[in-house]
Amino acid sequence: MFHRFANPARFLRFAAVIQPWIAGLTVLLFAVGLYLGLLASPADYQQGETVRMMYVHVPSAWMALFCYTGMAISCGVALIWKHPLADLAAKATAPVGASFTFLALVTGSLWGKPMWGAWWVWDARLTSMLVLFFLYLGYMALNNAFDDPGRGSKASSILALVGFVNVPIIKFSVDWWNTLHQPASVVKMGGPAIHASILSPLLVMGVAFTTYYLWVLLIRIRREVTANKVRALQMRQASRGEQ
């Protein structure tokens, strides 16, 4: 299975089949999640209507970590096994993960103002998330910093793997340090600490964000594969012209 879709042509055929299904599922999940989160779920007894920010902020933060983990794994596979699509997957994931991270930071700031009385505090969770955003930007900048694409891919992959140490720091920062950010309330020992009326739309939105990422990932990888084919044809034609 690992090598089955290493062939770009086989991957393109596979992606063409499942992409419409993922797109439809994404639209359906977002419609259900937004209805449950904005209309069907109750306001929080302390936070009031501002709690609805959670249905965007929390899935964005989840996906920021998920995307970076996927990017780091893809970089490792590309460095070790030279998988032809792994590097493309990492490149395709980086801007999507950066967008999720930026969205988590912005919505967290909007949520933090009424809750903490400040748009930003140098809290351990917030600071480590900001570092994650810069890691995404650093990966993309380093990937395009060399004339030789191979050197750029190798350098950016090493940065992504080294930067992965920040992911567990983000995850456990609320446990390791005394922070303003609330501790884990969904994935924790003893089960979720959120009422089902709030947990259900949150989980639906989490799945919707995940399928959205997969949808965009397929689109971006297909575009990269096509662009590589075009570049290869142009180089072949140029070499024939010189001969």
Image (tube, grey):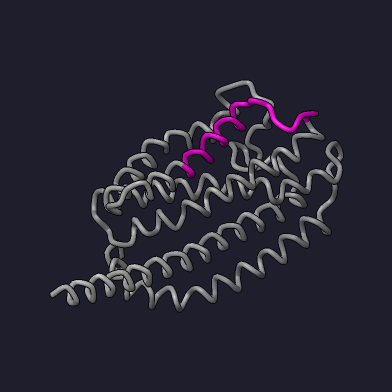
Indicate left or right for 189 with 117 as reference: left
Q: Main secondary structure of the magenta part?
A: helix
Q: Position of residue 182 (x, y in %)?
A: 68, 32
**Vertical relation: 81 (above or below) 11:** above
Image spot of residue 214 (x, y percent) = 51, 62
Q: Position of residue 5 (x, y in %)?
A: 32, 68
Q: Residue at x 52, y 44 (%)?
A: 65
- Image quadrant in which the C terminus is located: bottom left
Q: Between 11 and 94, which is closer to the camera in this rendering?
A: 94
Is residue 112 rendered to the left or right of residue 66? right
Quadrant hosting residue 129: top right
Q: Which residues are magenta?
A: 116-137
Residue found at x 56% / y 58%? 210
In the rendered view, tell whether residue 237 sits above or below residue 3.
below
Residue at the farthest left position: 243
Residue drawn at (74%, 60%) of the image: 34
Question: In the image shown, does 229 or 163 lie closer to the viewer?
Answer: 229
Which of 211 and 236 lies nearest the eye of the viewer?
236
Q: Quadrant of residue 127?
A: top right
Magenta region includes residue 114: no
Count every numbered label the image shows and give the total.
0
